[in-house]
Image: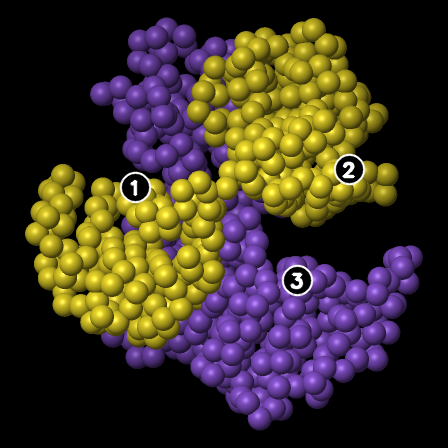
Chain colours: A yellow, B purple
């Protein structure tokens, strides 16, 4: 089944907004065993006509996003109906939903919003509980001009994503006739590089009949994706885990912070953080996870040396003698956070994010990570990530979270 | 001038990689007064042929990225030459550069890399100091089949971006003949919504001859983009600032946290943070900015009530009586952070991120923001952002940073 995505929006081509829809659609469709054969972006307005006309000749399914709003440059609905040769009529149920949407919020519905309830004759109107723009589904062969099924969907992710999950994917599954989409398993690893996988297991994965596999490397993370039938995936997984089990973050797409919150929770342990160079990124990542409050209690962002001394009890003399970015200070920060918080485990980071502050002995990108726990003493190790400030913070936070995970697991 | 971008890469359509090239190109071209008229993504391989064939019929300039590597699915060079009806020849200078690239790194050049020095007859080979894939420029009318100028460029940003700046943009400027590209000014605002702009100034902006304008709304931020000649932009800016000066974040693309770090620095003030529901996001955003260490010293992530009491001196009885998400606690957190840090200003947040923990009186999305300063006393205000956990944290952090900005400016 040839599936095309057409994203409309001048802001996408001016570069104000990065198009994240396309990648999101790719992942969602892949779970059904489907792939996007082409993605196109055009500006608002007339360019949509040409793009729809071309796409319905090539594709079995066309998914259009954007241009369903109430303003004068929102033309997707009208243009699609015209290209498909379908009349537009007012959908009474959609109009009532719109009126209710505004009434619920105590706002007056503008006249311009009425056109959002228009739809091509015979099309399905797809409800949008999150906003004012209902979607439209034109089944194949509704018109004489094309066999292509056409979806018109709103642009804002908050409205788009639920509509795709509830209205689009079930229809695509039915259209595709794929009964048993290939299974997909994504294994996330950290503390190990893509080349370790190539050298370690590629040759063995190649031997498994019907297995397709691939890697995706992020900062401090490598994802291994296995695609195939259940037996092929079972074999691929066994090989990957035999080689790299101790580096495994998750098998369900969970990020390292989610895996760590779960691990802390299962082990009834609490965590405290003491951050200098990461500036709160570690605690921010942990608290992105629902349920973090059960395992994370205290975070210290001791950006100034004075804060390291007063909040964590780091020795001012040691900062003077060894520098704030040192094994000694990382250990004292971790021990101090453990003491001040009463948590079971504390992790501390101190480093040089740059662009300034580096020296020949401690260049930008250097960080020390300290670890203290009630039962495991105090240790520290050095990492070196000479990257831009943002990526440095991310890489160091990843190493710190991973260190906590290993301390809990005793590996 | 009709310019199309064609991004090739199966990973883009599977959703493993978000396409950031398209937006980047949009911004770079816009500085020359040029716009992308269409962007297309196709998978590696044969789909590239059809996409190039269609694009060179529509466009004056086609920019293709990806598929210039040494492996068997890197086919862009061969396919483009075939579609344009041009023979491929070995470019001796490119081959020497490739050999030098490997020699410099002490690596053996594989045979597969030799094909990277092939180029259509008569094309310019674009040097790639960052990698092994040289680019290709086929000028218009080099062949009998199309008037379209074609660029073939490498996919990795580290190789692509410098090649575009050094080799592509100068050629585009010459092709376009645009001597004085329009100026662009982006004004960022916070604490005000897009509809306020529509109602407040759209009618007056419409009156300015030669001014094009548009809005882009993010969480806690609205960007106003003004495009036109210097006089049109001057007038548009004056109208926007007359109406909304106090909500202005920046005129140079700076984020709120960057504007705040600069403002603190100019006023020689230091800031401390006390975060509950945002979990370190505020301090993380501040420390993303180079130079933050001069103005930000202490951050407290008091996720547990006990941490609010022990680190910030919040009254346990008041938490009991009013709840942790309350005006009283927000004020005590801010005052406590000010006292414990010795900073000039402290901002505190306490709220309910959800998904659990809401009540009818304090639903998920409720947060109190407290503010304390040496010279301005202690105050707090409530915000309500019933969003998902991630967006809630972002919206609350934005409101907190904005509150600090207003306190410093005394507005």
Badges 3 and 2, same chain = no
Badges 3 and 1, same chain = no
**Mark 1: secondary structure:** helix
**Mark 3: secondary structure:** loop
Query: Which residue lies under the disc numbered 1?
Result: A166
Q: Residues within 10 Å of mark 3 (few under 14, many from 20)?
A: few
Comparing A70 with A66, the one in front is A66
Q: Residue at x 14, y 68 (%)?
A: A87
Q: CA distance from mark 3 to mark 1?
A: 36 Å
Viewer-nearest of discs 3 and 1: 3
Which quadrant of the figure has residue A45?
A: bottom left
Q: Answer left or right for B99 relative to B71.
A: right
Q: Residue at x 37, y 34 (%)?
A: B388
Q: Residue A200 bears which disc, if any? A: 2
Comparing A250 with A84, the one in front is A84
The first of marks 1 and 2 along the sequence is 1
Q: Residue at x 71, y 76 (%)?
A: B126
Comparing B19 with A272, the one in front is B19
Percent across and percent down for residue B325 are: 35, 20
Q: CA distance from mark 3 to mark 2?
A: 24 Å
Q: Residues within 10 Å of mark 1 (few under 14, many from 20)?
A: few
Task: From this view, report whether residue B103 is shown above or below residue B379.
Answer: below
Residue A380 visible to the viewer:
yes
Q: Residue at x 70, y 6 (%)?
A: A375
Label 3 close to label 1 by CB (< 8 Å): no
Q: Quadrant of the C terminus of chain B?
A: top left
Task: From this view, report whether residue B144 is shown above or below residue B9.
Answer: below
The chain to which mark 1 is attached is A
């Amino acid at each position: 089944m040839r599936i095309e995505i057409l994203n409309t929006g001048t802001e996408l081509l001016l570069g104000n907004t990065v198009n994240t829809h396309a990648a999101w659609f790719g992942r969602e469709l892949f779970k059904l065993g489907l792939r996007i054969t082409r993605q196109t972006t055009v500006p608002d307005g007339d360019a949509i006509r040409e793009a729809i006309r071309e796409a319905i000749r090539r594709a079995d399914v066309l998914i259009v996003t954007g241009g369903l709003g109430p303003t004068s440059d929102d033309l997707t609905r009208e243009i699609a109906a015209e290209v498909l040769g379908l009349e537009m009529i007012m959908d009474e149920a959609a109009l009532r939903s719109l009126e209710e949407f505004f009434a619920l919020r105590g706002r007056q519905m503008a006249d311009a919003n009425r056109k959002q309830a228009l739809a091509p004759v015979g099309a399905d109107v797809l409800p949008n509980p999150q906003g004012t723009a209902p979607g439209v589904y034109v089944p194949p062969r509704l018109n004489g001009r094309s066999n292509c099924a056409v979806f018109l969907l709103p642009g804002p992710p908050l409205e788009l994503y639920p509509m795709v999950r509830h209205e689009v994917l079930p229809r695509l599954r039915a259209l595709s006739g794929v009964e048993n989409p290939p299974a997909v398993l994504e294994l996330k690893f950290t503390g190990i590089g893509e080349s370790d996988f190539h050298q370690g297991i590629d040759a063995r994965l190649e031997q498994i009949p019907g297995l397709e596999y691939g890697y995706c490397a992020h900062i401090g993370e490598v994802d291994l994706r296995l695609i195939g039938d259940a037996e092929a995936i079972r074999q691929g997984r066994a090989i990957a885990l035999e080689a790299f089990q101790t580096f495994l973050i998750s098998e369900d797409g969970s990020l390292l912070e989610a895996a760590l919150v779960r691990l802390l929770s299962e082990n009834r342990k609490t965590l405290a953080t003491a951050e200098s160079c990461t500036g709160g990124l570690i605690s921010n990542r942990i608290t992105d996870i629902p349920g973090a409050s059960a395992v994370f209690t205290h975070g210290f962002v001791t950006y100034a040396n004075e804060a390291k001394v007063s909040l964590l009890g780091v020795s001012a003399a040691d900062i003077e003698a060894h520098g704030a970015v040192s094994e000694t200070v990382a250990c004292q920060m971790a021990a101090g956070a453990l003491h001040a918080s009463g948590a079971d485990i504390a992790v501390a980071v101190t480093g040089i994010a740059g662009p300034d502050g580096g020296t020949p002995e401690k260049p930008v990108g250097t960080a020390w990570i300290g670890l203290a726990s009630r039962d495991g003493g105090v240790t520290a190790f050095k990492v070196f990530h000479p990257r831009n400030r943002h990526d440095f913070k991310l890489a160091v936070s990843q190493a710190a979270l991973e260190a906590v995970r290993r301390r809990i697991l005793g590996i």
